[in-house]
Amino acid sequence: MAARTRKASRRGPEPRDPGTTRQALLSSALALFERLGYDATSVQQIVDDANRTKGAFYHHWESKEALLRDLHDEFIDDQLERARAVIGRDLPPDDMLRVLVAEVLMEPLSVYKPETTVFLHEHRFLSDAAFAEIKLKRDEFENIVVGVIQRGMDSGVFKNVGTPQLVAFGVIGMCAWSYTWLEADGKLSPRQIGETYGDILVNGLAVSG
C-alpha cells in the first residue's frame, strides 16, 4: 500500500491527480481527527489543511462520515488480507495463532496506529447504516480468529477454557488496545510485542503434556 504523506504542502496549488488529492484529504482528516476529534472537525478544516477544495472532497466522499468509514477500511482491509494469507498456510493451530497475533493483529500498528486510534475513539459517531458495512469486515476478521481457536480446541492443542468466541475476543482486544501505550514503550516493535503476546497466549492455552 502506498506510503501516506502526513502533512500536505502549503506552497501553492498542487497537481490535481485524483489519487494524490484523495490521500491528501485522508491524511489531513486523520491528523485533525486525532488532534481535535471527529465531531469537532469540519469538512472546511480538512480541505484547508489539505490545500484542496470542498468540491474535491465531495468528489471522493458524500460526507465526513464516509471518510471516517474509509479511514477504518485503510487498516481493516490490510488486516483481512494478512489474515486470509495466514489461514491459507499449512500451520498447526498454535503456530497459526502466534502468526495471527504477531503479523496480523500487531504488526499493522507500525503503519496504521493513527487510523486504529481514531476509529476506536470516534466510531460512536457513525450511523447504524455506516457501521453495518464496517461490521461485515470486522465479523469476517473475528471469525478467522475464532476458527483458529476452535481448531486448536477441537484438536486437543488448546484447553477448553471458554467458548472460542470469548477467547478470540480476548486475543483481539489485548492486541487492539495496545495502541494506548505502544509509543510510550518504544523499545520493541509492534511485531516483537506480538511475538511475546503470541507466546503468552499459546503457552496459556496449551494442554499440558
Image: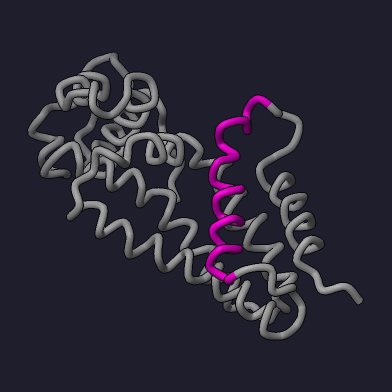
Image point (69%, 77%), residue name: 152
**Residue found farthest to the bottom:** 155
Give the left or right position of residue 203, taking residue 150 as reference: right
User: Image height check: is 40 above or below 195?
Assistant: above
Residue 113 in percent (x, y) is at 51, 38
Residue at 37% x, 26% y is 31
Q: Determine whether 131 is above or below 142 in the image.
A: above
Residue 199 in the image, given as x and y percentages of width and height: 79, 57
Q: Residue at x 64, y 57 (%)?
A: 101
205 vs 141, nearest the viewer:
205
**Magenta span covers which residues?**
163-184
Which image quarter is the C terminus in? bottom right
In the image, residue 66 above or below residue 57: below
Residue extending farthest to the left is 55
Q: Quadrant of residue 47?
A: top left
Q: Residue at x 33, y 27 (%)?
A: 33
Does residue 196 appear left or right of residue 148 in this picture? right
Q: How many marks?
A: 0
- Judged left or right of residue 68, residue 110 is right
Is the magenta region chiefly helix, strand or loop? helix
- Locate residue 9, reporting x and y percent: 32, 20
Pinpoint residue 53: horizontal percent, then vertical percent: 13, 27
Give the image quarter of residue 46: top left
For the residue pair 6 and 193, the one nearer the viewer reads as 193
Residue found farthest to the right:
209
Membership of 181 in magenta stretch: yes
